[in-house]
Amino acid sequence: MPQPPDFTTTLDVQLVASSQAGDMIAFEELVARHRDKIYARAFSMMRNEEDAIDLSQEAWVKAWQRLKQFQGDSSFATWMTRIVINLCLDQLRRQKRTRAESIEQLDEELGGVERQMPVVASNPTEGLERAELRKRIDKAMTQLSYEHRTVLILHEFEEMEYKQIAKVMNCSIGTVMSRLFYARRRLASLLQSLKKEQQS
Amino acid sequence: MSLKPTSNPSRWQFLVLLLTSLSALLGVASTPVEARVQAVLIWGTDEAKPTGKNLKEVDSKLRDRLANVFKWKNYFEVNRQTATLPSSVKVQTIKLSEECSVEVKLLPENVAEVKLIGKGKAMVTRRHSLSKPDALVLAGDDKNKTAWFVVLNFN
Amino acid sequence: MNTELKLQALLDGALDAREIREIEAILAQDIQSAALMQELKWMKAAVAGNEAEVKLPETREFYWSKIERGIAAEAKQAAAAPAERAWWLRFIYPATGLAAMVAVMFVVSGGRTTDGADTESVPEDVNAISFRSEAEAMSVVYVADENGTFNPVGQETKNEPEADK
């Protein structure tokens, strides 16, 4: 009986090349290697397990279909992440169209709210253990609108520049900058509230 | 028209007769004489143990195996049935709940055919090789993000 | 661009030399801008590298089986698309679909040959996927049904009151 291939020392580029030639076993190995990262990105954007699973799977199906287009300009993981980000953004836009906006969200969109927020005078994350810091940041991010959360994710986690984010989100660089500014200010305010809650 | 007995069968007739007998013999030989099947209906959920009187946690070994494959945290046994399948019996039906039963049939080549019947309709028909040690798990989505499992073990 | 966004752009390294000099001059004089800059710096430092760790809550086999199914379905759809195309493509597309299906079946079996016995059939309205977990010695057929219309466990069994015990 033939043994399944051992890919432990095989590089992503080699697996991609095999997958491009139609080798599904190589592609399955790529999925296994990067599935957590791709799912995590979908989850961070959607904040919902089911949507994240569905969209991450859809991303892998799309990736298989578009493998020929992958030229190796970026890493495979980066290319895959872009696919899942685009799918999540499409889904979020569709959801937004069918969802009533709250007054707060409308304010956020119109801008200017951030200017009324008092500046946080002491570092709200000072002295926190990393696990606790991550937990609080994650909790605070859930309270941002998807536009603000996405800009923050793309800039801070995916390390994308303003113009790259503008392209992905189909908006102007100015909008990206103001969304990022609002997201950071709101995050500071939320983290400060969490700190106060913890202290009281 | 009457048929006369052939006193001198031709070589071809003899060969056909031989092959037919051989294949019949082989067929019988490769059909398992008897098999036992255990069917367990299980409910998978992330919620804590409900207060239902017919539910008990599945044994830890099976729970670990299921949890390693599926995402649910808790697995509760709803019903367990064991049946013997003599090859002479065409189909053995095992009822697991009001809405669910399985029909098991032994086929040649050491294969069992399992039919999952839901609301009187065949939902899945699976041919399962008995030469492997695998359990056959028929499962699906249930209400409120839970799941049902029918775990079949043959020996 | 207003001063606040320029402060942020300075933090993100998105200003040219002249703009940097201008905004640094403002920072040196304006206490409020300096305080705002400090807040932005704290947030950038707090968020960077501190994304929550999330793991996919499904096994490798189960997750992959659904992707395979998606790939096979897309291949089937592409083969069935009645687009205007060259006559020879009519033969190529089904062949590709068939090849994909064969590949899918090969991978489902873990890349190993089987005795050919393990097959399943479902009615057209049932959406099922199958896979094998070698580690757990399980052959699985999973019926995907978001609405959970088939309830073999029965609602009354799940919720029977404690008092009945």
Image (cartoon, rainbow, N blue to C red):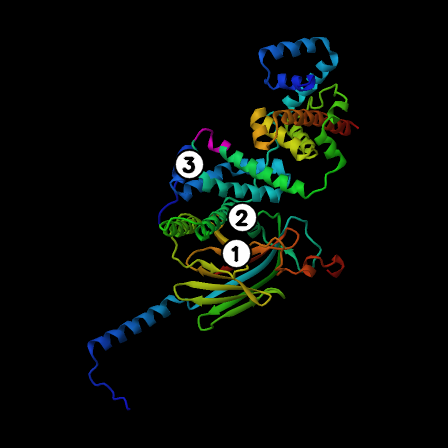
Q: Residue furthest bottom?
A: B1
**How far separated are the C-alphas under marks 3 and 2?**
27 Å
Disc 2 is attached to a residue of which chain?
A: B
Q: Which residues are magenta?
A: A72-78
Amino acid at the residue labelled 2 = Val
Disc 1 is attached to a residue of which chain?
A: B
| Crowding at mark 1 (Cα within 10 Å: few <14, some 14-19, many 20+) | many
Q: Which mark is residue A16?
A: 3
Q: Position of residue B51 (x, y in %)?
A: 71, 55
Q: Are marks 1 and 2 on the same chain?
A: yes
Check residue B92 for magenta coloring: no
Q: Nearer the viewer, residue B107 or A145?
A: A145
Q: Nearer the viewer, residue A41 or B33?
A: A41
* Residue denoted by label 1: B137
Q: Position of residue B93 (x, y in %)?
A: 54, 69
Look at the numbered discs 3 and 2 and tell me whether their residues touch, using CB distance below 8 Å: no
Going by the image, does C139 lie left or right of B8? right
| Crowding at mark 3 (Cα within 10 Å: few <14, some 14-19, many 20+) | many
Check residue A77 for magenta coloring: yes
- Mark closer to the observer (3, 2): 3
* Residue denoted by label 2: B69
Please say if B152 is above or below A125.
below
Total tally of numbered discs in the picture: 3
Q: Residue at x 56, y 39 (%)?
A: A87
- Label 3 sits on a secondary structure element that is helix
Disc 3 is attached to a residue of which chain?
A: A
Q: Nearer the viewer, residue C92 or B109?
A: C92
Whether residue B70 appears in this view of the structure is yes
* Quadrant of the rendered image containing residue B33: bottom left
Amino acid at the residue labelled 1 = Val
Q: Quadrant of the N terminus of chain B?
A: bottom left
